[in-house]
Amino acid sequence: MAGAGEGGIEATASGRPCQFVGVGIDQYKHGFGVLAALKGVDAIAKILSDKRGFATTVLRDVTKSQAGAELESALPLGGVAGRALVVLWAGHGESSTEGRLRLITHDDVANGAPLYTADWVAGQAVRTGATQVLLVFDTCFSGQAAIDAAQVVGRLMADLPDPKPVWVGVLASAQTYERARDDGLFAAELRRVLEEGPRDPILRLRFNSFNQGVRGDDVIDAVVKEWPTDAQRPEPSMFGRAGILLPNPLYDPDAPERVVEHLLLAAQDRAPDEEGSFFTGREEQLAQIVAWMDQPEPGVLVVTGPAGSGKSAIVGRIVSLSNSIERTALLANGPVDHDPGRGSVHAHVHVRRLTVDRVANLIDEQLCRTGLLAGAEQPRDRYELLGAVRRLNTQITIVLDGLDEAEGEAWVIAGDLVRDLGRLARVLVATREMGRDDGGPLVAMLATVAPIDLGDPRWVEQSEADVREYVRRRLQHEGWTEP
């Protein structure tokens, strides 16, 4: 009934591969309908084996007696210590009178006592000593599994001796009151994310092409946020600090350092489906930024102003002139008057809808790629990043765009990361002004030098001239000639 296979070896401290354990049950002896669960389990196993070297074990149509023995064998106490673990159970599930989700084996009968449950599977998985654990339940009513497993995981992560997980994520394919579709939609969506990455451009930023793996919470987020139907909705639950867990389908070992698309388009004042660069003017603001970047002191310079005033275009121009590839393209159009220089920006992040630790992770990844920071097993959180930057012997420049678009998290990013980074490095921030009841305005909280306010009346005349020149360039691009 059971089969196992191993792929290449994952680069872990132990030299042993990470682990995938799948349970797929298609056939039932006592009245449950036939499913196609094993097809999805096998597909996920192949992706993890081929792309990231997971050792894979798949249990097929197991009975009650087989399930317990074979799962205990596949998930031994301390047997995955220091590595990643993914467990997937796909098949029929039943709400029990005891209030727990009953995972149905090949020879179970309807309304029986819940022998195998999500909390039982969670207990086995957490005790393996894996550092990053993802538990996936693809059954009817599996939202209950997220609740049951979460209760056990919370206790075990607090009380178990080491080794124990740093992060545990639970992803259920349906809500507690929903039947799961039997057409394999959930497995297909999970496969799509693992094979193609998210469709949403903001989510795709988290699947960095420079990293072989992605975090478990980012994969969960992509499945949940891009779910295609209201007929059935996945339910997530997470504990601890997420790290690299699953293969990154967007990884490219030969990828050149690139500018975040949002900043690149803003810097060129064009739409995603257009070619060319239409950036115009802003000379005084660019000169002020370049002069500030030439100073040795750390600090925070804020570019602010109303929506559509050109904040992203200005900071995007600075980032693009720093990037080797984009710099070459820009200089092909002629010399620039205010040039920060190649490699002058050491990290840049579009902050929209990100958490403070995710912003810190992205900054850390870029500083590691440039060789400024030594690589770490997991991306550094905000506190580790600040400590690493403090130990640098060189001044660096970091650009953060769209701080206001982080919404409620903007104040945490500003207070717990940007202000402290500004004591150690130069931080250029583009944001609209924000205020809150228990504090002052965001710009005043951050800025260590006079901000560049694009809403200031003194910029109006220049902005009008820039807009006229911008329109002229766009019309010329479309074939219009001046009379």
Image (spheres, helix red, strand yellow):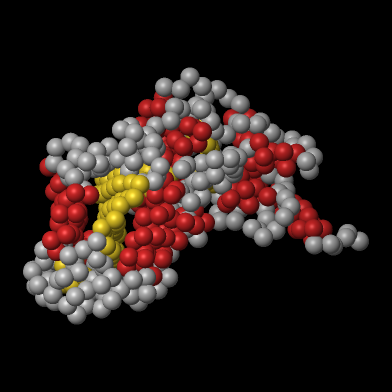
Please tell me which residue is depicted at 56% across the width and 47% down the height of the picture: 260
- Residue 131: x and y in percent read 27, 41
The one of 34 and 267 positioned closer to us in this rendering: 34
Left or right, 399 with reference to 83: right
Judged from this view, the residue extending furthest toward the right is 483
Q: Position of residue 15 (x, y in %)?
A: 34, 33
- Residue 323 shows up from this direction: yes
- At x 50%, y 27%, the residue is 372
Q: Residue furthest top?
A: 393
Q: Quadrant of the C terminus?
A: bottom right
Q: Residue at x 21, y 77 (%)?
A: 32
| Rendered view: 256 above or below 341 | below
Residue 238 relative to residue 455: left or right: left
Work out whether residue 317 or residue 234 is closer to the camera in this orientation and state it. Answer: 234
Residue 146 x/y as whole percent: 23, 61
Left or right for 48, reference 333: left
- Residue 411 can be seen in this image: no
176 sits left or right of 42 in the view:
left
Which x, y percent locates residue 330? 73, 42
Front one among 107 and 364? 107
Which image quarter: residue 44? bottom left
Q: Nearer the viewer, residue 400 or 465?
A: 400
Report the quarter where the N terminus lies.
Answer: bottom left
Q: Looking at the image, how many numbered discs can be counted on the residues?
A: 0
Residue shown at 58%/40% (left/top)?
A: 254
Q: Is residue 277 placed above or below 257 in the rendered structure?
A: below
370 relative to 56, above or below: above
